[in-house]
Amino acid sequence: MRGFARVLSFDVISKAILAGLGIALIRFVPANEYAAYTLALAMCAFVTGSISGSLNRLYLITSEKENPSETSAALGVQLLLISLVAILGLPLTVTLGVNYALVAALVVGTCATEFAKTCHQRDLAFTRYSLIELTRSALFAAAVGLLIWHHGSDLNASSVLAVQVLSLALVASIALKGVLSATSIRFAASKAYAQRFVRFKYLDFFAYFFLIGLFSQADIFMLKALGDDQMLATYGSAFRYYGVLSLALTSAHAVLLPALRHAEDAQALAGLLASHRRLVIGFGILCGAAAWAGFWVIPWVDTGRYPEAPTTFAVLSASAFISFAFSPYVNLLMRRQAFRFLLWLVAIALPLNLVISAALIPQVGALGAAISLLTSSAFITGLIFRKSRGLTGTLEPTHP
């Protein structure tokens, strides 16, 4: 668990910076602009989760360090898919205006930095992995600080997105130099790399990540469709605090998948799971304390602008705990390549999420979206745990 502790320690600093940034944005960005910013981040997260999330995970479990040309080919596939999605999504410019171009650029920057992190994650170079996250957080926070100093409370979503894109571009340009070496991105190599995974079971894999990307942002999309800017901004503010709690989940996923890949027998796997269980108790206490403190801290942060945010955050805290507690088991199913099971699971959970959201959001707003996320996430993680209980005694190869 030294890798986990290293990633977590850097993430604590990174998320502390982002937490301060989140407080500043909640204070200085008007509710309607904060709602627009929340929607833009949700769109970015959906695309990057579907493309970068799936391909990085696949690269992590199949790549070989000795083949540097594979690295550039893998990144090339992501950039080609992002370009295609950006073209298909052009009709959204009618409603999003300039924010559409900024979201597209944000997707490119995010995918580039996430890919660089994945390369270090594959090599168990967790210090370099974490430095990328820390650097981009610090640059973004510094840029927003300059915006606040110059504009005060007149910040808009477009200006915040613009400086976020610029900070990501700088970090990505430096980070990719360290992982691409002298190789360059070639269309033929990227095409050949993609063809390796045009198989039925990998179609399940990509479909799973598409649906899980949509599932992870469904609450925000439903708030946009059924609620108003105040509801969306309230949920966005609560989700900022939830993101701080989720740093432990991010750290767990960053370390567990490569660790599971290198675990050679059932005893090594049992040791990993036992180490994680010891962390669950402490994280549960942290979530409970954070939810309790939120009823006093959050109104002070947002100056009472979002009165429903503390209750919404309390529900999201419960969701964060459940996700952390069961995080090793989805990675175990990934190693066993149980893609079909994961796909059907999310295919059921997504409609469940939408139905609960449709029923609750008109009645209780942002709290309804949080309850929907908690319920559907618990459904997914519970069934993943049940499925994986019979798989902890054996390990199978991860290469295609």
Image (spheres, rainbow, N blue to C red):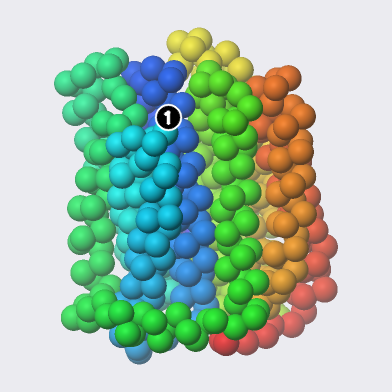
Any part of residue 168 in sight: yes
Which residue does the image show at 72% across and 42% down from the upper left?
Answer: 353
Left/right placement of residue 160 relative to residue 195 reads: left
Of the pair 316 and 160, the residue shown nearer to us: 160
Quarter of the picture containing the C terminus is bottom right
> Within the image, what quadrant is residue 101 found in?
top left
Of the pair 314 and 90, the residue shown nearer to us: 90
Where is residue 84? Give x, y as percent.
Answer: 40, 62
**Pointer 1: what residue?**
36
Which residue does the image show at 76% across and 36% down from the upper left?
Answer: 356
**Above or below, comparing residue 199 to residue 220 in the picture:** below
> Within the image, what quadrant is residue 366 found in?
top right
Left/right placement of residue 2 relative to residue 395 reads: left
> Within the image, what quadrant is residue 37 found in?
top left
Any part of residue 371 in sight: no
Q: Amino acid at mark 1?
A: Ala
Where is residue 135? Give x, y as percent.
Answer: 27, 50
**Above or below, comparing residue 319 to residue 276 in the picture:** above
Which residue does the image show at 51% across and 30% down from the upper left?
Answer: 236
Where is residue 154? Give x, y as percent.
Answer: 27, 17
Question: Disc 1 on helix, strand or loop?
Answer: helix
Which residue does the image show at 54% across and 40% down from the upper left?
Answer: 245
Of the pair 41 and 309, the residue shown nearer to us: 41
Neighbour class for label 1 at 10 Å: few (<14), some, many (≥20)? many
